[in-house]
Amino acid sequence: QKDAFSTQKEIIKKEFEIISLKSELTNIKNELTNTKDELASKINEIECLGTLCPASQKTKDILDPVVMG
């Protein structure tokens, strides 16, 4: 009886741990997706700067956000 209870308790503990890890993986996946989208946006901005702005303006546009934070 005691062993069966201990085993059931361990199974429930492991199932909870699996659910928690799945949730953590989902959060990481979402963060990676957001980072990918941000990088794609920044690449697009840089490509646009390369074709639309004069060189001095490109440098200013790139450095201003870095300096301003």
Image (spheres, helix red, strand yellow):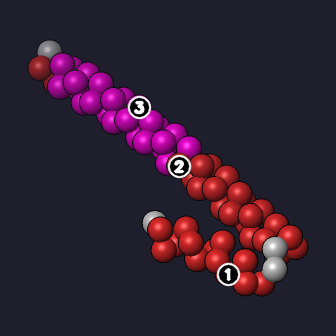
Quarter of the figure with the N terminus: top left
Q: Judge by depth and name the residue closer to the eye, 17 or 61.
A: 61
Task: Work out which residue is located at the far top of the displayed protein and give it.
Answer: 1
Residue 29: tell me if it is visible.
Answer: no
Residue carrying label 3:
19
Amino acid type, residue under disc 1 in the picture: Thr
Name the residue rendered at 22%, 24% in the picture. 9
**Quarter occupied by residue 61:** bottom right
Looking at the picture, does residue 2 appear above or below residue 35? above
Circles 1 and 2: CB atoms closer than 8 Å: no
Residue carrying label 1:
59
- Residue 27 placed where, x, y %? 48, 42
Left or right: residue 62 compared with residue 53: left
Amino acid type, residue under disc 2 in the picture: Glu
Looking at the picture, does residue 15 appear above or below residue 37? above
Looking at the picture, does residue 67 appear above or below residue 25? below
Name the residue rendered at 67%, 52% in the picture. 37
Residue carrying label 2:
31
Q: Judge by depth and name the residue closer to the eye, 66 or 26.
A: 66
Q: Judge by depth and name the residue closer to the eye, 33 or 43.
A: 43
Task: Work out which residue is located at the far right of the displayed protein and give it.
Answer: 51
Q: Judge by depth and name the residue closer to the eye, 65 or 20.
A: 65
Please provide the residue range marked out in magenta: 4-30
Mark 3 and mark 2: Cα distance apart in space: 19 Å
Mark found first going from the N terminus, 3 or 1? 3
